[in-house]
Image: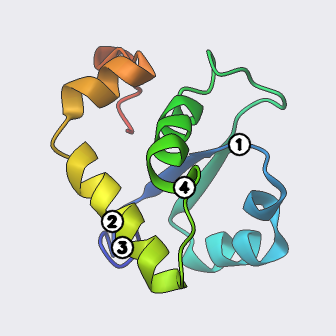
Amino acid sequence: MRKRYPTDRLVFLLDNFKPHKAYIVKQFVEEDGNIELEYLPRYTSLKCNPIERLFKWFRRVVTHNEFFENIADLKNAIRAFFRVVVNLPKRVVSLLRLNLNSFPKIL
């Protein structure tokens, strides 16, 4: 994200997955100085953490019952999924049940 938005303030909404709170992540954020991390409350349900519904769809389409010979094949499958998803914004919004007008102005 920093490569794509080199000078913008970036805000990431994260769950409490241990790697998201790793020292290296905190160090990177501190060194960058223009990134903010916001964490969801622990044990947030699918209702409160809509990105989990997108991840569920992603896993069902990309990784369930699939074997990848190598990391390149996995990366290609991931890219293919998001090439399709980027053209389905209404489905994504519906899946996430988002009211785009309710987002804070910083997003």
Q: Nearer the viewer, mark 2 or mark 1?
A: 2
Label placed on residue 107: none
Badge 2 or badge 4: first in the primary sequence? 4
Residue at horizontal 74%, vertical 69%? 26
Res 16 quadrant in image: top right
| Residue 79 image label | 2
Q: Earlier in the sequence, mark 3 or mark 4?
A: 4
Mark 1 is on which residue type? Asp
* Residue type marked 4: Thr
* Whole-percent x, y for residue 33 in the image: 57, 71
Q: Secondary structure at mark 4?
A: helix
Q: Earlier in the sequence, mark 2 or mark 1?
A: 1
Frontmost of labels 1 and 3 is 3
Pointer 4: what residue?
A: 63
x 83%, y 28%: residue: 43
Question: Which corner quadrant holds the C terminus?
Answer: top left
Q: Which residue is mark 1?
A: 15
Q: How is the image coloured?
A: rainbow
Residues under numbered marks 1 and 3 in contact, where contact means CB atoms less than 8 Å apart:
no
Residue 36 or residue 82, whichever sits in front: 82
**Residue 22 place in picture, x, y as percent:** 82, 68
State which tag comes first along the sequence, 1 or 4. 1
Q: Secondary structure at mark 3?
A: helix
Mark 3 and mark 2 residues within 8 Å of each other at the beta carbon: yes
Q: Nearer the viewer, residue 40 or 94?
A: 94
Residue closest to the eye, 80 or 69: 69
Alpha carbon separation for disc pair 2 and 1:
23 Å
